[in-house]
Image (spheres, rainbow, N blue to C red):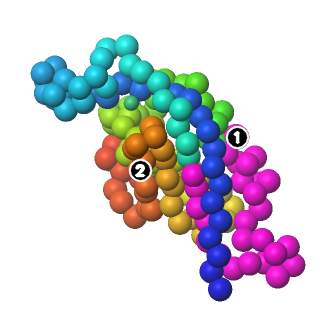
C-alpha cells in the first residue's frame, strides 16, 4: 500500500533572472522584466510530497510535526525573506523557480523519511514547477 502525503509552506523571496554567460541584450530578451537590475519578489508556495506505507500504529505516512520542524529549520529560515541571488545555492546558477525546485528537493531529501516523491513550487498564480529528483544539478555539484 502506498499513500501520498503533501504539505505546503509559504515563503517570500526576491530574485533577479540574469545569466552571467549571456550578453545584456540576450538577458533582456530571455527574461524580460525579470532581468531588471533591482529584482522583484514572489510569494512562493512550496509543496513537498512523500509516499509510503501507512504506519499501522500511528496511521500516518509521515510525521508532519517533524516535517514542519525540518522545513522551518532548513527551508524557511534560509529562504524566507531572502534574496535568492545572494545565496550559495545560486552561485553561478540562475535563481529561476525551476532551479529553486531542484534546490528544495535536495534539502527535503535529507528529511528522515525515505519516500520523497517530489517538490512542487508555485511562483505565481499561473506558474508552477515540479522536481522529482534524478537530474543533474546545473551548478555542477550534486545535492
Ligand atoms: Ni520572478
Residue ID for mark 2: 129
Q: Is residue 48 magenta?
A: yes
Q: Position of residue 73 (x, y in %)?
A: 70, 40
Taking the view exactly as shown, the residue that stands out farthest to the top is 38
Residue at 31%, 14% in the rendered image: 37
Residue at 58%, 25% in the rendered image: 81
Q: Position of residue 74 (x, y in %)?
A: 64, 42
Magenta residues, start to end: 47-73
Task: Assign ligand 1 to one image quadrant.
Answer: top left
Q: Which mark is residue 16?
A: none
> Of callouts 1 and 2, which one flags the residue occurring earlier in the amino acid sequence?
1
Q: In the image, is 115 to the left or to the right of 25?
A: right
Q: Is mark 2 within 8 Å of ligand 1?
A: no
Q: In the image, is 27 to the left or to the right of 71?
A: left
Residue at 58%, 55% in the rendered image: 48
Closer to the eye: label 1 or 2: 2
Q: Position of residue 78 (x, y in %)?
A: 60, 33
Q: Residues within 10 Å of mark 2 (few under 14, many from 20)?
A: some
Q: In the image, is 72 to the left or to the right of 120?
A: right
Q: Is mark 1 within 8 Å of ligand 1?
A: no
Q: Is residue 71 above or below residue 84?
A: below
- Secondary structure beneath dot 2 equals strand
Q: Is residue 61 magenta?
A: yes
Residue ID for mark 1: 72
Residue 63 occupies which quadrant of the picture? bottom right
Taking the view exactly as shown, the residue that stands out farthest to the right is 57
Q: CA distance from mark 1 to mark 2?
A: 21 Å
- The residue lying toward the viewer, choosing from 75 and 143, is 75
Residue at 36%, 50% in the rendered image: 137
- Do callouts 1 and 2 mark residues in contact (Cβ within 8 Å)? no
Amino acid at each position: 500500500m502506498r499513500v501520498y502525503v503533501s504539505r505546503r509552506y509559504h515563503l517570500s523571496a526576491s530574485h533577479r533572472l540574469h545569466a552571467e554567460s549571456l550578453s545584456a541584450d540576450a538577458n533582456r530578451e530571455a527574461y524580460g522584466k525579470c532581468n531588471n537590475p533591482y529584482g522583484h519578489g514572489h510569494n512562493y508556495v512550496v509543496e513537498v510530497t512523500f509516499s509510503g506505507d501507512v504506519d499501522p500504529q500511528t496511521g500516518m505516512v509521515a510525521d508532519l510535526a517533524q516535517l514542519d520542524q525540518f522545513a522551518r529549520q532548513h527551508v524557511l529560515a534560509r529562504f524566507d525573506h531572502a534574496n535568492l541571488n545572494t545565496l550559495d545555492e545560486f552561485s553561478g546558477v540562475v535563481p529561476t523557480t525551476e532551479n529553486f525546485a531542484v534546490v528544495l528537493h535536495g534539502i527535503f531529501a535529507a528529511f528522515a523519511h525515505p519516500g520523497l516523491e517530489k517538490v512542487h513550487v508555485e511562483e505565481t498564480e499561473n506558474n508552477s514547477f515540479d522536481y522529482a529528483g534524478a537530474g543533474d544539478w546545473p551548478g555542477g555539484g550534486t545535492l
